[in-house]
Image: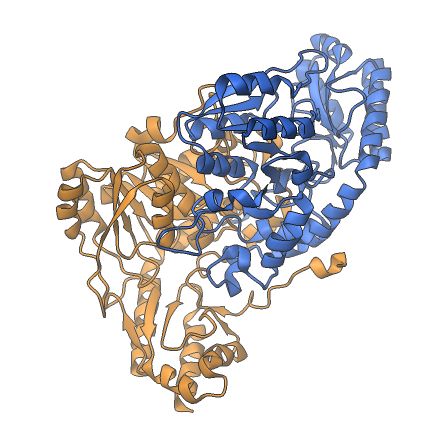
Chain colours: A orange, B blue
Amino acid sequence: MSLEQMVYTRPNKDRINLNPLQTGGILTPEARKVLVEFGDGYSVCDYCNGRLDQIDEPPIRKFVYDQLPKFLGSDIARITGGARDGIFAVLHAITKPGDTIIVDGNKHYSTYVAAERAGLNIIQVPNSGHPEFKINVRDYEKLIKEHKPAVILLTYPDGSYGNLPDARTLGEIALRNNVPYIVNGAYAVGRMPIDMNSLGADFIIGSGHKSMASSGPIGVVGMKKKWEEKVLRVSSCYKSKELEALGCTARGASIMTMMASFPYVRKRVADWKKQVEKARWFSEEMEKLGIIQLGEKPHNHDLMFFEAPGLFEASQTHKRGRFFLYDELQKNNIWGIKPGLTKQFKISTFSASKEELEKVLGVFKEILKK
Amino acid sequence: MSLEQMVYTRPNKDRINLNPLQTGGILTPEARKVLVEFGDGYSVCDYCNGRLDQIDEPPIRKFVYDQLPKFLGSDIARITGGARDGIFAVLHAITKPGDTIIVDGNKHYSTYVAAERAGLNIIQVPNSGHPEFKINVRDYEKLIKEHKPAVILLTYPDGSYGNLPDARTLGEIALRNNVPYIVNGAYAVGRMPIDMNSLGADFIIGSGHKSMASSGPIGVVGMKKKWEEKVLRVSSCYKSKELEALGCTARGASIMTMMASFPYVRKRVADWKKQVEKARWFSEEMEKLGIIQLGEKPHNHDLMFFEAPGLFEASQTHKRGRFFLYDELQKNNIWGIKPGLTKQFKISTFSASKEELEKVLGVFKEILKK
């Protein structure tokens, strides 16, 4: 194999992107520059004195100890290897194997996997089913009383329907029942305004590569000061090394792209209202085409789940079968609906402009006309 | 704060680099190209069917299931979030809190931290002390009989002296005593030939950003087939998701730079003999200047520890005090000895050419003459 063959390319890079996993992780021009500057392994360690998060040049300390907790509305913040790593770190630090956790039925699979890895029993609060799949946070309280969980977790919003349950009321329930409360904001932090303390949560989880315009993997965790001693406990032998971080977490290009994108991310969060308007408009236009939006309506997030009986019907007779939709979208430079899906699919309107979404709607219209 | 201020630069990027943390993690030109191509968060997930390590485009499956185990001399391989994350994953999977681990006294701090995080008791095999600081692997056997450890670990080579203990004999001891054996090869895998099975180890750990010309954080772990069931166990609910990986580990630029650099890394490993010759020559030249190499002699690795009484003496009267050495090296475009060190410091000769090292020696000579 020649070296030259190893220069992989990514043809979808510059298409109109509707993939919910990807629309919040597209790098800013500033991040692209530092990516090259800090691409080498251990690049940020040039001036490290033993604590990654206390490096002053580049100003990681300022980011982690000042900007990030303000942004998350938390007392303390740290960088993690990703949202799931942050969830596992918190669970591992504050629970014992055999304890119980209560999570929403719309949780991301990695929440389940993190809890399993920590040896926990997992109780799920069911959603309301078709068509809205909503989580009623009041359903947590009965289960809390019954199962005495070591911790509860809410996905805000979830990654299937983009529903935003009442996280603040769950904060009151958590306080009343004296149970630690984690908000998984992997699709919130970096997209929309969110404030841990005002939700009454103990922990907030974010994802850099999902929603903070960062090259991954990287995540953030915010917490109340009272958890510092447990979650940020240090080695008995190496007093500057936090155990749950294994000393250092995301270094190099991941942390530097997060920092480089941060001023832009902070600004886009303030513009969230426009994102919601755009999503609602897109949803209405899709419904005019007979493509039905499931989940909360009117919708409050750019991530939406659609049901398209007309496209499914077309796939039954098309010579490319269920792959025809993917092919048609590719032809029109549109990316993000998984190959093979026609009946149900997720779309995020976060990174596409209104003009681009008009083009997307036009393509759907054409396909349905045929 | 303006956006433009967030384009951080890294002035040390193109200097002669002697920093042991950094010399093996400098990207190849191919890796720099894919870094930009796959910089966006979740970029490698374009064609994912639920398993990161089984993505065919880009060919991650081929890398993880074919090339990597061959390279490590292991039955199975996986990508991890870094060497320390690999060590923690193995310990977490095959031990219980309260178990004992035996490690070498030259271990990296993160081994200690990973074992603490897993709730293990840590017994250390002391080194031979000044000047060689060698680990006699036969010292493990008595401790194994005494403490009945759940696992033993050897750092090969260690990150302080670059010593290469007799890993193969420890493999025989591990087999004889029926104890699982981890080789931490963070400074070996990607620099020098190493073969897990021929060392008789159960696990081998590598670091992408330390020694495989990758943008971090990323690591690799190789293992014997018999550990698959425990270490790679999957979720009870999500059958394609491995618990210790929390489903997915290093994605995006980290895995892509590792793959892009891999043909070059494989080639440089085959040239290891030249690296050892270069290191030995450098050590001899340093000793002619009165700068003494500690650790094994003749040395078998590019990472070396030096003691420089002459430089320490000079720092006592220099107006910049202990920072004078760092300043002098900076002036000459040489990077990698920590600011403030003069009496003892580490140097890696891995990435510098012989001509560059001649320049380094010339600078030391000039400084000592003054």
Q: Pick whichever, A48 or B367, lies toward us.
A: A48
Residue A57 is left or right of residue A226, and the answer is right
Residue at far bottom of view: A370
Q: Pick whichever, A104 or B194, lies toward us.
A: B194
Query: Residue A369 placed where, x, y %?
Result: 40, 90
Residue A320 is left or right of residue B344, and the answer is left
Q: How many marks?
A: 0
Is B131 drawn above or below residue A340 in the view shown? above
Query: Residue A343 placed where, x, y %?
Result: 36, 77
Do we see residue B118 in this rendering? Answer: yes
Do we see residue B40 in this rendering? Answer: no
Query: Residue A39 placed where, x, y %?
Result: 62, 46
Query: Residue A5 placed where, x, y %?
Result: 72, 61
Picture quadrant of residue B158: top right
Q: Pick whichever, B274 or B305, lies toward us.
A: B274
Q: What residue lies at 86% left-to-right and 21% top-to-bottom?
A: B285
Residue B223 is left or right of residue A202, and the answer is right
Is A290 drawn above or below residue A370 in the view shown? above
Q: What residue lies at 60% left-to-right and 27% top-to-bottom?
A: B176
Q: Pick whichever, B196 or A270, lies toward us.
A: B196
